[in-house]
Amino acid sequence: MKYDILLKDGTVIDPAQKLHDRRDVAVVDGKIAAIEEDISAREATQTVYVDGKYVTPGLVDIHAHVYAGVTTWGVKADPVCTTTGVTTIVDAGSPGWATFPGFREYIAQPAQTHILTYVHISGIGLVYGPVGEMHELDYAHPEKVADTIMENRDITVGVKVRQGQFQVGDNGVEPLKLAIKAAELADTSVMVHIGTGIPLPDILKLMRPGDVVTHCFQGNGDCIVDDKGRVIPDAWAAREDGIIFDVGHGGGSFNFEVAQRAMEQGFISDVISTDLHSGNINGPVYDLPTTLSKFLSLGLSLEEVIEKSTIAAARTIGREEQLGHLKVGSVADVAVFDVIEGEFELFDTHGTMVIANQKLQADLTIREGKL
Ligand SMILES: [Zn+2]
């Protein structure tokens, strides 16, 4: 047999290749072997007929928390990812340099899911709810963070910092400055959590092209829109400068009204991620397809939400060569979805509900050529 798996008669959406058409996808030895209009089922050991379904690159969730057992935020990656089309999940800074070795050995290495991580600028990383990890500037060691990243390039993607008053106490934007220092030493990017108590313009003016704002549609104060609902000029300027805006839905950081207002003005996030953690996996987040469905209800097309959770996500973490597309020869990370019609109640983190009439539901997840 020429191929291990053949996905036959589906509609392929692969924004990286500007492809949205009926195609058959063949996999061999863990890689994409062919995408053609008609591949015979006789050439494959296993053929899955996916007529009426969408075949996409495996989803890349760039903000989640999977350090289960070490931080109270952590969820186990495999049970959720392997059933929701997510083939790569990025922990947004649960490990700091001090707790990194355990993340590598006990979380990333044994998982079926491809697990990557940001390294927190605070050595202790994330611990549990009430801990403000950067109340003490002494907790940050830019050199140690940079060394950790450089010695573990295979699973690290950048530096994480949380810039809400709750996390930094009286330290203002000093933690961000330390995170940027670490990122410069390791030649990587910074992901910045935005929240109340620290003026957003102060944060944005320090950030560099390629750095990431996460929780971009949070509605707790110091957000991207002003009290009249207008996107602040600083956010537009940051975007012009190449700063990336990511959703990071989370347990308290996604507000339908902020998203709607911003999107009406043309301010659409570059990446859609979940910030999945133990406090939101049973709602309102559940998983990445549910978060994507919220953006379908806000008016994005299926192609746009797939782009923002595949190639745009991969590009943001510097993995666009390897991940986020179905190019022949690349790793066979593939998802198959149904778009189901009906009436679905979807909630933001403020208890606001929208009724969506479409919902994305994963049917199959293939990681490195394995169903
Ligand atoms: Zn988070």
Image: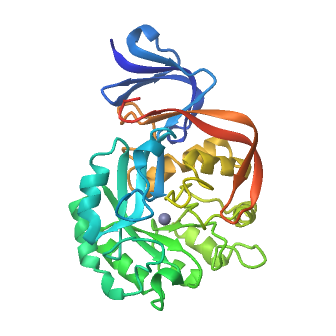
Q: Is residue 370 above or below residue 355?
A: above
Q: Nearer the viewer, residue 269 or 195?
A: 195
Which residue is nearer to you in this view: 27 or 46? 46
Residue 229 can be seen in this image: yes
Residue closest to the far top: 42
**Quarter holding the N terminus?**
top left
Q: Determine whether 131 is above or below 92 in the image.
A: below
Q: Which residue: 54% across, 23% down? A: 23
* Place of residue 63 in the rendered image (x, y in percent of width and height, measured from the top left): 47, 59
Of residues 187 and 276, the one nearer the viewer is 276
284 and 147: which one is in front?
284
- Is residue 270 rendered to the left or right of residue 369? right
> What is the x, y in percent for residue 275?
51, 59
User: Residue at coordinates 31% horizontally, 67% vertically from top-left?
Assistant: 187
x 58%, y 80%: residue: 200
Compared to 59, does 196 lie above or below? below
Q: Is residue 154 visible?
A: no
Q: Position of residue 301 (x, y in %)?
A: 68, 44
The quarter in which the C terminus is drawn is top left
> Residue 82 lies in what quarter of the image?
top left
Relative to 187, say whether 232 is above or below.
Answer: below
Seen in the image, is 66 located left or right of residue 19?
A: left
Quarter occupied by residue 145: bottom left
Q: Is residue 12 left or right of residue 78?
A: right
Q: Position of residue 112 (x, y in %)?
A: 34, 41
Looking at the picture, the colour scheme in use is rainbow
